[in-house]
Amino acid sequence: MANAITPVSPAAPAAVKDVQPQAAPQQAAPANQKTAQQQPAPKAPAPKDTVQISTAAQSALAESRETSTQTAREASRGDRQAARLLAKEAAAKKG
C-alpha cells in the first residue's frame, strides 16, 4: 500500500458564514415626525470554493481515522504500515 506523495497547493481558507446584522428595534414615531430610514443594499452571496483532495491525501486521511482494532487486524494480515504504527505505539507506551 505504497502511495507516492506529491506536493499539493495550499487550500484556500474556508468560506466564512454570512452573518446578517440584526435590525435595531424600531420605536413608533409620533405622527408629526417623519423618519427616513436607509436600508443597506443587499449583498451578493459570497463565492463558494471547491477543494480537490489528492488520492494520497485521501489515503492519509483514511489511515488517520482508523481505529486501533482495524490497525491491528491489518497488521496481522501483513500490512507493513500498520505493523510499524503498532510498534511505534507500543514503544511510546513503554517509554
Image: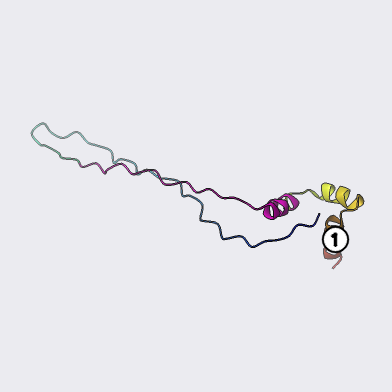
Q: Is residue 5 above or below residue 68?
A: below
**Residue situated furthest bottom in the rendering:** 95
Viewed as shown, does residue 34 lie left or right of 12?
Answer: left
Residue 53: x %, y % from top left: 62, 51
Q: Name the residue at 26% across, 44% down.
A: 40
Instruction: Locate the N terminus by quadrant.
Output: bottom right
> Could you tell me which residue is drawn at 51 percent across and 52 percent down?
14
Q: Amino acid at mark 1?
A: Arg
Give the prevailing secondary structure in the magenta stretch: loop
| Secondary element at tag 1 | helix
Quadrant for residue 27, please give it: top left
Q: Which residue is mark 1?
A: 84
Q: Position of residue 18 (x, y in %)?
A: 42, 45
In screen coordinates, is 29 left or right of 85?
A: left
Residue 7 position, x and y percent, is: 64, 63
Question: Over which residues does the magenta segment extend?
Answer: 38-63
Observer-nearest of 33 and 89: 89
State yes or no: residue 70 in magenta: no
The C terminus lies in quadrant: bottom right
